[in-house]
Amino acid sequence: MKCRNHQFGEIEYTNEHVFDFPDGIIGFEHLHKFIVLNDAETDPFRWLVSVEDEEFSLPILDPKFVEPLYEVTNSFEQGLTVAVVVSLKEPIESSTVNLRSPLLFDPNKHTGKQVVLENDRFPILHKFIAEPQLVAGEESC
Amino acid sequence: MLILSRKINEAIQIGENIRLKVLHVSEGQVKIGIEAPGDVKIYRAEIYAEIEKQNLLAAQAKKSAAAKAAGLLPKPAAQTKVNDA
């Protein structure tokens, strides 16, 4: 099968690549069928791409790159792949990942969902790029 | 907006399957118990709104910005202290 994406052009995929999100993701509840795209240019960032809406692509990241102690699957079923949603901002150092509501993929059932963790130890806005320099006396947050 | 007054241990029934009960009130904080079917999603409203905002923002991302951020990512740290958390 083929779909188009505004950033990646024409994409060929099979049913096995498709993850079904019965509830969509928060803010995009109307979208249900996604594929995960690797892109050499942006690796290790990957892209959650909708096969239903060619305007939709969302950068995601394996949380090990930003939070080695992040353990989500223990509190849920095992065997799921975890990814966090990346909000790229300007300046780039102010970009954040959302550790509070990761995406969980079930590679066996080809399903996925965005969950909201009860544990508020994991922030929605987690900066993951070191600031170039902090001015002396400035509070870090 | 419908506004109802409730005392402690009184509840509000929404539809057939959802019940909100006031459990505790003190110093400007209310504890609410919620009974609802498992498929009903329940969020703290401000958390939901912030997640929605970040998802909408994330979906604007350009490849070029991701490539730039990829170059600035810290290397994954060795997991030496996982069990100490």
Image (tube, rainbow, N blue to C red):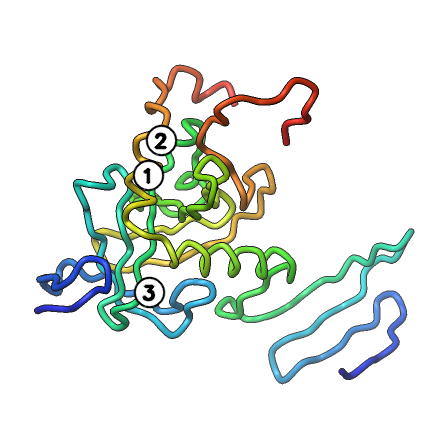
| Position of residue A29 measured from the top left corner of the image (x, y, whole percent) | 42, 71
Q: Secondary structure at mark 3?
A: loop
Q: Which residue appears at 51% of the width and 53% of the height?
A: A116
Q: Are marks 3 and 2 in contact (CB under 8 Å)?
A: no
Q: The numbered mark 2 sits on a residue in which chain?
A: A
| Position of residue A91 measured from the top left corner of the image (x, y, whole percent) | 47, 40
Q: The numbered mark 1 sits on a residue in which chain?
A: A
Residue under label 2, please give it.
Answer: A65
Q: Dot 2 surroundings within 10 Å: few (below 14), some, or many (20 or more)? A: some
Q: Residue flagged by tag 3: what amino acid is it? A: Phe
Task: Residue A18: name its quadrant.
Answer: bottom left
Residue under label 1, please give it.
Answer: A62
Task: Residue A70: name its quadrant.
Answer: top left
Figure check: A99 above or below B10: above
Gap in Å between the C-alphas at discs 1 and 3?
A: 19 Å
Q: Residue flagged by tag 1: what amino acid is it? A: Asp
Residue under label 3, please give it.
Answer: A21
- Picture disc at residue A54: none
Q: Secondary structure at mark 2?
A: helix
Gap in Å between the C-alphas at discs 2 and 1?
A: 6 Å
Q: Are marks 2 and 1 in contact (CB under 8 Å)?
A: yes
Q: Quadrant of the N terminus of chain B?
A: bottom right
| Position of residue B62 measured from the top left corner of the image (x, y, whole percent) | 32, 52
Of badges 3 and 2, nearer the viewer stands 2
| Position of residue A10 measured from the top left corner of the image (x, y, whole percent) | 12, 64
For this rendering, which residue is in front, B33 or A52? A52
